Image (tube, rainbow, N blue to C red):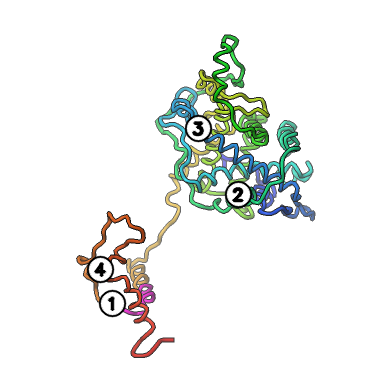
Amino acid sequence: MRRTRWEEACGAARRDILVTLAELPLTHNQPFWLGVHDGQELISSAEAECKLISITAALDRLFDRCKETVRYTDVSVRRWLRGRFPDRPYKAPFELVMRQASERQYRSEFKRCVCFWFRVLQLSPTIAWSIMGRALSQRQRRMLRQLWFDPAWDTQQPPGQDTVQQCYDEDEFEESEDESDYESTDDEEDEKEGTRGFNLPFEKDDDVSVEESASSQSSGVGPEDPLGDIVLRFCYDMATEDFEDGRASSSLLVYFSAVRGLSRPRGDEYLRPHQFTPVLSRLIYCTRLIFLERIVPRFAHAHIGLSARPLYGQLQMLKEVRAEKMCDGTMSPLGEFLSLLAYGRALHGTEGPVYHFHWSEDAREALGQATKQSRRLMYEWEPLDPNFNSIRDRLSMATANYSFVTDPTNRISDAYLESAYEGVYISGRWSS
């Protein structure tokens, strides 16, 4: 608690409403009930929820483009992308998660963040202050309104059922098993102080020839997606947001991470380190995707005036940003996440196992209970001891539905029928 300062960020807040604000949009075009505050019902309108569905769908398309950029980015650049310190890359490159369920789970973290802040935007400043214990700064409100009222919405069609179902599927996988150890920390790396000098690396050098410039853009033509472009701009603004008065929780991403540290559904408890570090890993993963797509995109994002990456100097473009905004120890959301992740994992190691087992003093109670349950499942029937040496189990067999039970040599495929018969036909009569 001293490290995360969650009590400072959320101690005086309405935690139950904060948790509800971070939920994904509903599956149908209907209002979203947030809770009751000071006798007033707080509801996100159906129109706002419909717009959130469109934003989360645009975020999916953006992450698809991020994946393409990662696939066509060299290992050396991806090693620096994953590195925690400004003076050296990580020993292994940044990689995409493998399982689709994990990818949906990772993406849902940023979707929740977007939904959280745009629902807060719909609240009056007075109510938002009383719920969160803080207010949106002028810059943060300008960032949110820039996306919410962008002219790109004038040509946007209402989301269809496919989009709604996609958002629903995200929520289904939220509580599933997370990818273990995507974001690993290297204990051998020493912390170094990063250099300053954060500049947007998109201005072309004057000495670059017209021929080189044309060739650099020849492979940078991709599908136009104005909504995806403005979502990229907003996510990048969140990822590079400065801390107000040195407080990490003043930024949108870090405050949202504190909300994700509350237990569901009422937020009456804080998550333990082993529960919260997967959330940090997901946020780190998605933030790095945003950085890569904003700095060295494979395809242009025309709506926000972002050109495709040039053929040369990509690593230098990344380094100019990462020293200030992407490394451990920097006053940036990603720097804070990396620090919290390392601290959380170290703290988790001192807590011991998550689950504890208590054995009886005579060490026989567990065996007795297991025997009792086995007899109950077998209807009190005790078959003859099998000869395991005669049972064949072909481990190399790749045929579907094969097991030692179905192997014809063992002749036990119908053994369950004998067990059921013995259980219901006892002492010459049928058991009720």
Q: Give percent across and percent down for residue 152.
A: 72, 35
Could you tell me what secondary structure mostly forms the magenta stretch?
Answer: helix
Residue under pointer 4: 410
Q: The disc labelled 4 sits on which kind of residue?
A: Asn
Instruction: Give the Cα distance between marks 1 and 4.
Output: 16 Å
Against 244, residue 30 (above or below) is below
Residue under pointer 2: 166
The reply to whether residue 258 is visible in this rendering is yes
Q: Give percent across and percent down for residue 261.
A: 58, 46
Q: How many marks?
A: 4
Residue under pointer 1: 383
Instruction: Give the Cα distance between marks 2 and 3.
Output: 23 Å
Q: Earlier in the sequence, mark 4 or mark 2?
A: 2
Question: Along the line of sight, which residue is nearer the eye, 258 or 215?
Answer: 215
Q: The disc labelled 1 sits on which kind of residue?
A: Pro
Q: Earlier in the sequence, mark 3 or mark 4?
A: 3
Left or right, 99 with reference to 14: left
Instruction: Give the Cα distance between marks 2 and 1.
Output: 51 Å
Q: The disc labelled 2 sits on which kind of residue?
A: Gln
Residue under pointer 3: 70
**Stretch in magenta:** 372-381
